[in-house]
Image (cartoon, rainbow, N blue to C red):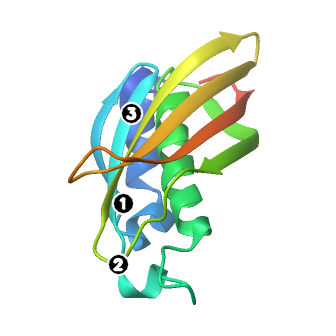
Amino acid sequence: MSAPLEGVAFARRMWADDAASRLLGIEALAVERDHAVVRMAVRDDMVNGHGIAHGGFVFALADSCFALACNSRGEVTVASGADITFTAPSRLGDVLVAEARVRAAYGRSGLTDVTVTRETDGQVMAEFRGRSRVVHRG
């Protein structure tokens, strides 16, 4: 039996197996303990009937970033809930950057904040707060 992967290596392994994030074109820019940064371009198949990015795709970007940060401690960690506030609309061609930071980890639970910005000007597009739960110790 092989030894469990440590911290950041564990999160990177999880990311390598994340077909959903890969399908959305999300790329990991940074993965550190309790911190992650990812990026995604808004494609034409992500735009809704109002001509703006569907909120579900912005949520998915933030959620993927959240997952990287939460799992950077080397334990299987999942979302137990999350909330998002959209502060500005994203449009076709925008490149969105999400940055996550674990704010608190206590017992098997945690809180992680994710800010989504537009890459070109740093405009905040959304704020996400995720609640996590460790389901298996690495």
Circle 2/circle 1 CB separation < 8 Å: no
Query: Which residue occupies 64% across, 13% down?
Result: 104
Tag 1, which secondary structure? loop
User: Earlier along the polypeptide chain: callout 1 or callout 3?
Assistant: 1
Residue 101 place in picture, x, y as percent: 48, 24
- Under mark 1, the amino acid is Ile
Q: CA distance from mark 3 to mark 2?
A: 24 Å
The extreme top residue here reads 106
Query: Which residue occupies 60% across, 41% down?
Result: 128
Residue 129 place in picture, x, y as percent: 65, 35
The extreme left residue here reads 120
- Under mark 3, the amino acid is Ala
Residue 133 in the image: above or below residue 56: above
Q: Which residue is mark 2?
A: 92
Q: Which residue is mark 1?
A: 26
Q: Quadrant of the C terminus?
A: top right
Residue 25 place in picture, x, y as percent: 34, 68
Tag 2, which secondary structure? loop
Task: Specify few, some or many for label 3: CA neighbours under 10 Å numbering under 14, 14-19, or 20 or more.
Answer: many
Q: Is residue 1 visible?
A: no
Q: CA distance from mark 2 to mark 1?
A: 15 Å
Circle 3/circle 2 CB separation < 8 Å: no
Q: Which residue is mark 3?
A: 36
Q: Left or right: where does residue 77 sit relative to residue 87?
A: right
Residue placed most toward the observer, 113 or 52: 52
Residue 60 place in picture, x, y as percent: 55, 59
